[in-house]
Image: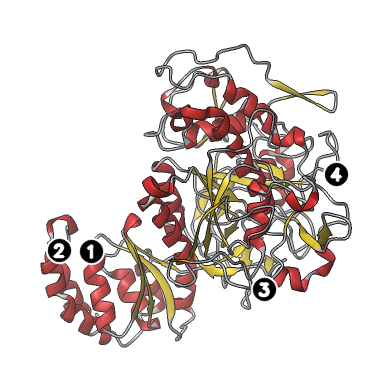
Amino acid sequence: MRPGSKTLTSALRGCDVPAACGLGRLASVTLVAAVALLTWAHPLAKSKQIAQLTKLDQALTDRVNRGAQDDVRVIVRSAARDAIKQALAAHGDRIEADHDGIQAFTATVHAADVQPLATHPLVDSVSIDAIVQSHQSSANPVLATERVPDVWSAKAGATGAGVRVAVIDSGLEPTADLDMKRIAGFYDFTKGGVSAAPYDDYGHGTHVAGLIAGNGANSNGLYSGVAPSAKILAFKVLDGTGAGYTSNVIQAIDFIITNQKILNINIINLSLGHPIFESAATDPLVAEVNKAVQAGIIVVVAAGNYGKSQSTGLPGYGGITSPGNAPSAITVGAVDIHATVGRGDDTVPVYSSRGPTWYDAYAKPDLAAPGQSLVSVAALHSSLYAQYPDFRVVGKTGDVARYLRLSGTSMATAVASGTVALILDGAGGNKPYFTPNLVKAILQWSAIPIAGYDALTEGVGGLNAFGAFTFSKNINPTLPVGTQWLTASIAPATTIANVSLPWAQTVVWGNTVASGTLLSSNQTAWGQTVVWGNTVVWGNTVVWGNNVVWTNPSVWSSTVVWGNNLIGTSIDGTTVVWGNTNVTSSTVVWGNLVSVTGLSGSHVLTERQP
């Protein structure tokens, strides 16, 4: 036993049940706890490291096992966090932020303090404060200029009026397309969450916000967003390079939840993420997303841009990023519509991340949306605008280029968020009945499968905004649970470019694929109290693994990136490396189809953009 370890354990032993401990009692032991941390001088033997570090995520486990000596930012979850914080502070570690909503805090700690945290009985988990990155593709957009066609946006009768969307991103630069009248708030969490004049030094957030709610004023309406009457609240968490801390994202979401009665936000758009380092059950960013959904906010998240094998150039599986692995979120992959209205030539770009998710093997993405070469509002004072002049687009003859053409699951996520805004606009006074679960189910049910792709690539299919809007307008969500709520007969197909395209008529609910007539009536699952994926008895379900539910399971099973071909990030954090690595994690069983192995390797965060 190392010097100080007994002292640390003994000091907090009386509060092994945190609910029974008052704050004063916890505070009284912090000096002894601090001494214990200070006197923990030697690393454990490697055999004991692995056994005792189960509370660490993979990134921190790797740091400990390779003997990293530099300070590190961590997110600590503990019901007794006040005592743990005070002990760390007394030892010279720096407390960065509190996260009350998930009983956590962020701190910069000495390398030697990670192990005591990992073995402390009052600490639930310790995660690296990972660098989140925007999710526009590293591939240059093609030169074809694409807007979101009206048939996708389903604007007839809805424009997003009365809907408020939180864009947690790199900021927002006001423009005629999205002026101060429709910017309902700006909060800078790179500077502590201060309310400030809107700005965007990177440009990604402005582009995303324009896809959601730009009105096309600088292009005579040509480059308008999906919901041009929606209001945007911008939460800046990414810096001028498009990077930021996970803890800043958590703070922004917690601020939204805490102030929901004042902010009245309906949708959160997260076009960002970081590699998955742990199960969704312990991932602090996933926990915060789940809290937002439980509060009734619809959270739309990018799947990530890790779909391409760097060694072969071929599609690779398992690249979903956090918080795209949140079961409650609507996780969105990208579609290339090739500048056409018809769906017959739609493809999934190779960069779009595919499932299953690391550790948990969740089926993600939930669906895919247009995300390739989309034109939206530019932040003229941003680094993206300065560095990539070839991406600029002129909206009016004789004017300067006020738009940018970008690609990625970030853009697809914005299109999906705009579609949700249309659904909520159409709901009018019934907005509260359109819970996150119901909206997610409607989007999946009405999606149109993309020919040639499996369920780990496209989810249930491509976003069908017109179909989703039509379905939502033909239900009465106020009717009691167990009753039929359709107000009209709805043919489960949408005609696009004179072709009738059947809907997926599928909802992926946890480990089941639900179909049949489940959306024709109000069911418990669509309420606010049910967590997505929890046990619900459907009339007609298909269990993953027991049946071949994939379009072509041989496609993904032969190239899925598990076992000897794992996904990891390079030491310098600039690329995603696909290739052989040591297998040290436990095996996860994906249905009855394939056994897969958890993430291993070095993880210093993420691709560079664009």
Work out whether 361 lies above or below 582: above
Q: Quadrant of residue 420?
A: top right
Residue 304 percent coordinates (x, y): 64, 55
Q: Is residue 323 left or right of residue 506?
A: left
Establish if 97 lies above or below 345.
below
| Measured Cα–Cα span from mark 4 to mark 3 | 31 Å
Residue beneath disc 4: 339
Q: Quadrant of residue 481?
A: top left
Q: Which mark is residue 80?
A: 1
Give the labeled residue for mark 2.
15
> Which amino acid lies under the numbered mark 3 shown in the image of this protein?
Thr
**Residue 511: image x %, image y %?**
51, 36
- Res. 105 in view: yes
Query: Dot 2, how many residues are within 10 Å of its Cα: few (below 14), some (14-19), or many (20+)?
Result: some
Q: Badge 1 local density, few (<14 within 10 Å), some, or many (20+)?
A: many
How many angstroms separate mark 3 from mark 1 (CA)?
37 Å
Q: Secondary structure at mark 3?
A: loop
